[in-house]
Amino acid sequence: MSLPDNPFPYSDDNKRYHTWNYYLRHRFGGKVAKVPLNAGFTCPNRDGRCGWGGCTFCSDQGSGEFAGAVQQPLLRQFAVGCDRMRQKWPDARFIPYFQAYTNTYGPLEKIQQCLQPFLSLPQATAIAIATRADCLEEDTLQWLADCARHKEIWIELGVQSVHDETAQRIHRGHRFDVVVQALKRLSATPLKTCVHLINGLPGEDPAMMIESARQISALPVDAIKLHMLHLMKTSALGQDYLRHPFPLLSQEQYVDTVVRQLEVLRPEIIIQRLTGDGVASELIAPQWTVKKTIVLNEIDKQMARENTWQGKALRHG
C-alpha cells in the first residue's frame, strides 16, 4: 500500500514509481541484489555479423565494467560478488546477472553450460540475462522458457531508443521492429522482460526520449531501465566527443525528462533503474552522473512537488 499522501499504488514508501526493490520485496520477501557476471560472450556488431566495434556508446568492457573477472569460473565470480554485497546487506539474497556483452549470442550448448549451474543453486533467487533483440534463436528461447517454469528468469534487451535513425547513428545493428517482434515472442513464454533505454543519445531531444518510453509502455514488457548516456574513454562515442564535443543533458534536464517518461509508463512496469554507473576513472562526461543518490532524490522531489506519478499521463489517454 502507498502512503496516505502518495497516490501511486505500487509503493510502500515515498516513491511515486514502481521500484525494483518494491517488486523484489513483495516477490521474494526481502532484499535481493544483482551480482554482475562476465561469461565471455561477444556481440554480433563486434564480430562482424552485423558490424564491428560494437555500439558507439559501449566501452571495451561490453557494458560490463562492474562484472566479475572473465578469467574466473562463473560460480567463483558469483561467490565473490555475493561476499562483497553481504558487507552492505548481510541478509540479502542474490540474482546472478549475466551482464557483459550479449549473453544469448552463441550456440545453445555454451549458453546452457553457463546457466545450468545457477538453475539449481539455492543462493540464486532468479537469473538475469543481458542480450539483444536480434540474438534470441528459437532453440535458445525455448530452453530458457522451459527453465523459467522452475526459476524466475529475466531477459534484458538493450534497445536504447525506439528511433531507427538513432539506432543507425549508434550502430545498434537492427531496426526497432526487431525489438517489437522479440518482445511479442517473449510474451508468449514465462520469461520476464526488461528493456534498457538511454537518455541523451546524439540527435535526440527530450520529446524523442519520452516517445521511446511511450512506445515501450505499449509493448508487453515487465520492466524498464533508464539511464543517462555515459561517455566512456574506451567507447567510440566518447572519443568522438573528445574530438568534437556535442550537447549533453544537464542534471536538471535529465531529471525532468525522466519524470515525463515515468508519467507515460504503465504503473505495472517495474523500474529497475533510473540512473546508472560509469567507472569514474573512465568517465569523460557528464560528471554529475557519478552522484546517483542526488539524481534519484531530485527525481523524487520533482514528482512530489508536481504531485505526479508513474502512469499519470495515461489516465487521460
Image (spheres, grey):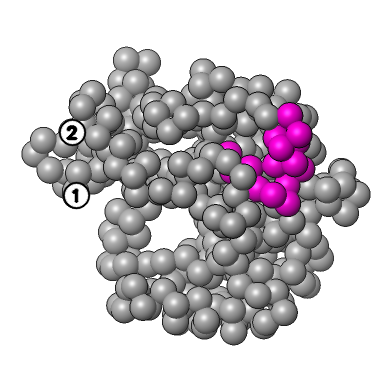
Q: Which residues are magenta?
A: 229-244
Query: Observer-nearest residue: 184 or 172?
Result: 172
Query: Observer-nearest residue: 129 or 149?
Result: 129
- At which x and y percent is residue 111? 72, 69
Residue density around tag 1, few if under 14, some if 14–19, many if 20 or more, within 10 Å: some
Q: Which residue type carries mark 2?
A: Pro
The answer to whether 165 is drawn above or below residue 181 in the figure is: above
* Magenta run includes residue 236: yes
User: In the image, is 96 to the left or to the right of 3?
Assistant: right
- At which x and y percent is residue 9? 22, 40
- What residue do we see at 8% from left, 39% from top? 4
- For the C terminus, the quadrant is top left
Find numbered disc 1 in the image and state the secondary structure of the residue it sits on: loop
Point out which mark residue 12 bears: 1
Point out which mark residue 205 bears: none
Seen from this angle, which residue lies furthest front?
243
Mark earlier in primary sequence (1, 2): 2
Find numbered disc 2 in the image and state the secondary structure of the residue it sits on: loop
User: In the image, is 307 to the left or to the right of 275?
Assistant: left
The answer to whether 19 is drawn above or below residue 263 in the figure is: below
The picture quadrant where one finds residue 26 is bottom left
Residue that badge 2 annotates: 7
- At which x and y percent is residue 296? 34, 43
Seen from this angle, which residue lies furthest top?
316
- What residue do we see at 16% from left, 36% from top? 6
